[in-house]
Amino acid sequence: MDLLSAAIFGGLQGFTEWLPISSSGQLTLAMVNGLNMDLEEALAMAFYLHIGTMLSVIVRFRRDVFKLVKAVPRFREDTYLKFMTVATLSSFAVALPIFLAYLYFIDDLTGEGITIVTGIFLILTGVVIYRSQTKGVKNLTNTRTRDMIIAGAAQGLAVIPGVSRSAMTLGALLGMDYDHRLSLKMSFIMSIPAVLALSIVEIRFVPAYPVPIAVGITVAFLVSYATIDILMVAARKIRFDIFCVSFGAIAAGVGLVVMLH
């Protein structure tokens, strides 16, 4: 991957991460079909670009992150920290077997195959977004352990390209009647340990193209930090469920046509 492509994809990651669409799914499709990258290499690059958006979350919500760190000694009494811990463990429990299975079968997948699979999951993501368009009132004072597990498990499914992490976590939280603003914040902060774990898993690709990775991460950070507040507002007004279903249907249809021919 050249530096210009890395910068472009970093910008796309930074711009789309806050929207309830699958940024990794879009990027993987573009890199596999547009740059003829190997699927495993494209997935690694897509995961790495999430480091930039993760860093912007840490900077943007630094007060919340600091509160969580300070609360570690009183873990049992702090509901916020407990929610994040249980949700994170639940995410890992769901994501790890899916990710390992993905790596095992990755050599058997073709560009057309991953396009179809990604398209299908984009459609499912759109359905989740549509069904979660409610205004909840629940907050952390009346949360339950079951809620933490469900939210984490929903995030764990986002390891599949085409499944939007923000859409799944927001869908789960809003579906359990949590306040919209709280759900957005929780969704962002839940991404920090998840992205760290994925980045560690993908560390083996650093020697291949470290400079493009660094450029992509930097651009993703700058763009995401500059647009996070704007896109948080836009996410409430734009029908991303229609976008996901439409784009997913097109991607799956194109992949199927190419595969049959």
Image (tube, rainbow, N blue to C red):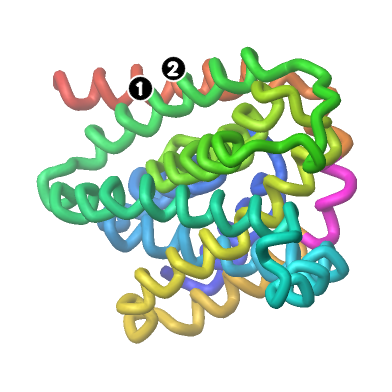
Region of the chain picked out in magenta, as a range: 225-232
Left or right, 220 with respect to 85, comes to right
Q: Position of residue 21 (x, y in %)?
A: 60, 35
Q: Position of residue 190 (x, y in %)?
A: 63, 54
Q: Is residue 37 above or below residue 197?
A: above
Alpha carbon distance from label 2 to label 1: 5 Å
Residue drawn at the location 74% of the way across and 23% of the way down? 177
Q: Is residue 230 magenta?
A: yes
Q: Amino acid at mark 2?
A: Ala
Q: Is residue 241 magenta?
A: no
Q: Tag 2, which secondary structure?
A: helix
Q: Is residue 225 above or below residue 180?
A: below
Q: Is residue 31 above or below residue 122?
A: below
User: Is the Cβ of the residue at disc 2 closer than 8 Å to that at disc 1?
Assistant: yes
Q: Amino acid at mark 1?
A: Ala
Q: Position of residue 26 (x, y in %)?
A: 50, 41
User: Label for residue 222?
Assistant: none
Q: Quadrant of residue 22?
A: top right
Is residue 22 visible in this depiction of the protein?
no
**Mark 2: few/some/many CA within 10 Å (<14, 14-19, 20+):** some
**Mark 1: few/some/many CA within 10 Å (<14, 14-19, 20+):** many
Q: Position of residue 252 (x, y in %)?
A: 35, 22
Q: Mark 2 highlights which residue?
A: 249
